[in-house]
Amino acid sequence: MRDTLVLNASFEPLSTVTLNRAVVLVLQDKAVVEQAHPELRMRGAAVDIPAPRVIRLCQYVRVPFRRRAPWSRRGVLVRDRHRCAYCGRRATTVDHVVPRSQGGQDTWLNTVASCAEDNHRKANRTPVEAGMPLLREPFEPTPADAMLLALAQDDFAALPDWLVLDAA
């Protein structure tokens, strides 16, 4: 996990920042470290602190309400944890449940991660027409869940226990 999760003063996920930016925020007393990398330390001439994995801002930042996470191909792969919705193997492509040739759109509920073989085999048919049932139904993640999924795409155990993913 290369990025550092930034929490608002109310413990709501806000964004991710680089490790260097997180250290600057901590050193300027604008944030406190909530969780640190177990082995990494940031050392300087007069500084020796653990490398932050999760930081919390000291002052509350008001952010506009965002109802939906923006759809993206990368987001679908991350949401499905790079696992094919048809066979469970490693997914490298995104497949439309209702094909675009039949009016399907690029939405969270109409796209799933798929391996190239299953994507090609399904072609421009629905899963029912192709006889390929979905292992799990697609869902629309909340904006906070989408950010946490993207942050922890390689190591879910790296997130603190108190940061619970609603849709994962």
Image (tube, rainbow, N blue to C red):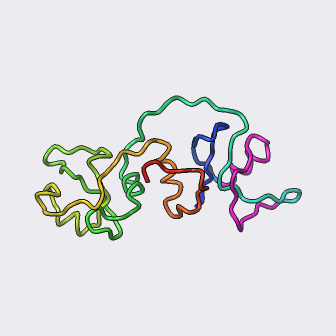
Please name whichever residue, 47 or 89, is drawn nearer the observer in this view of the structure: 89
Residue beneath the point at 36% across and 45% down: 140
Q: Quadrant of residue 36?
A: bottom right
Which quadrant would the N terminus be assigned to in this image? bottom right
Q: Farthest residue toward the right?
A: 46
- Residue 112 shown left or right of residue 142 in the figure: left
Task: Look at the image and say whether residue 26 sits in the magenta stretch.
Answer: yes
- Residue 106 shown left or right of residue 160 in the figure: left
Which quadrant would the C terminus be assigned to in this image? bottom left
Task: Look at the image and say whether residue 32 sits in the magenta stretch.
Answer: yes
Residue 58 position in % (x across, y down): 73, 38
Q: Farthest residue toward the left?
A: 129
Residue 147 position in % (x across, y down): 50, 48
Residue 89 position in % (x across, y down): 33, 70
Residue 29 position in % (x across, y down): 79, 42
* 150 is higher (above) or lower (below) than 67: below
Please name whichever residue, 147 or 159, is drawn nearer the observer in this view of the structure: 159
* 59 is higher (above) or lower (below) than 36: above
- Residue 135 shown left or right of residue 159 in the figure: left
Please give the range of residues in magenta: 19-43
- Counting every numbered tag in the picture gives 0
Residue beneath the point at 19% across and 49% down: 98
